[in-house]
Amino acid sequence: MALAHEQLLRMTATAGLNEPQNSPVARHVKAVTIVICLAIPREPLNKILQSLLLASTLSLCGCASLISGVTSGMAADLADTIINSDDVDTVREGVPAYLLLVDSFLRSSPDNVDLLLAASTLNGAFTVFVDEERAKTLSEKSLGYARHAGCLSTRTLCQLDVLAFDEFEAQLAQLRTDDVEAAYVLGVAWTGWIQAHSDDWVAIGQLGRVKSLLGRVVELDENWESGAAHLYLGGLETLLPASLGGRPEQGRDHFERSLELSGGKYLMTRVIYAEQYARLVFDKALHDRLLMEVIEADPVVEGMTLPNKLAQVRARELLGESDDYF
């Protein structure tokens, strides 16, 4: 079953349309993917847009030293406009341009951590719109960018995939609050890479490392992006029923905590909770209640309007299937 960022992106691509997912690409994200997604919560979006504005401004004046003060306010305003938009089509259609701009700008600034984090997020988000082989390629890029950004940010995030597991856990213990953003983006990219390589048991075997990494993010700052790490952990713990090694009740705890940390205003949490947990344990009452709460809620919330609109679209779809599913 898809995790939160994949579901958000699928909804962005098809919201309000009855056409295949090969239509023009999405936050967010999550529309601009990340933009709308859990994954791509608001602060990374600000950095993505700031980097893009920087790139376009450089092309005009060629002087990086004059830019940062000018672009920061513009980027913040643009980010606010996107995340508070209820025009899914307009946001969705902008993603390919953002993807190309971020990738191309990295050619001249390969060690720019903010750009690397943005590129990781966007490339990973785009995988849900392409065929399996292309998804593998994009997820490799996403993970590569995230690993490079993490290693530039702190040596503690270097080579986490090759360490023995006890060394891996010892290294995670050295992470500090300042490392949360890079660790979170790495965890999300790693999850996307595993999804794209789900036919490879070696890749599947790395799920434990991803859960440990995101768990460490929660330990350091569970409030990061309004509880986003809890939402991802909830998704990871409810991929399988308990009989096959899943931990649905721990997943439920993560979903509940994510709701608490977001004040219940981030409606997508309830949608993922219903689709991944309630359906997994065949709890129709919980499933329908969560979805009705989404449908009846006011989607207009500062910084959450776009993902909330998408959540309502998906909630109606799931509720319409409820009687057949249960």
Image (spheres, helix red, strand yellow):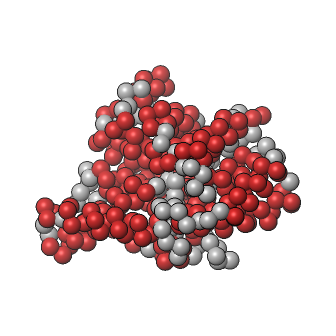
Q: Position of residue 9 (x, y in %)?
A: 56, 63
Query: The C terminus appears in which quarter of the rendering?
Result: bottom right
Q: Quadrant of residue 249?
A: top right
User: In the picture provided, is 116 more to the left or to the right than 20?
Assistant: left
Task: Please determine whether, in this image, residue 192 is positioned above or below residue 168.
Answer: below
Q: Position of residue 176 (x, y in %)?
A: 36, 32
User: In the picture provided, is 211 more to the left or to the right than 78?
Assistant: right
Task: Please determine whether, in this image, residue 311 is positioned above or below residue 180.
Answer: below
Task: Please determine whether, in this image, residue 206 is positioned above or below residue 28.
Answer: above
Task: Name the residue rendered at 56%, 49% in the picture.
Answer: 263
Task: Name the residue rendered at 82%, 50% in the picture.
Answer: 285
User: In the picture provided, is 163 more to the left or to the right than 275?
Assistant: left
Q: In which quarter of the image is residue 80?
A: bottom left
Q: In which quarter of the image is residue 22?
A: bottom right
Give the camera-side residue of 61 and 138: 61
Q: Position of residue 184 (x, y in %)?
A: 44, 44
Give the camera-side residue of 98 and 75: 75
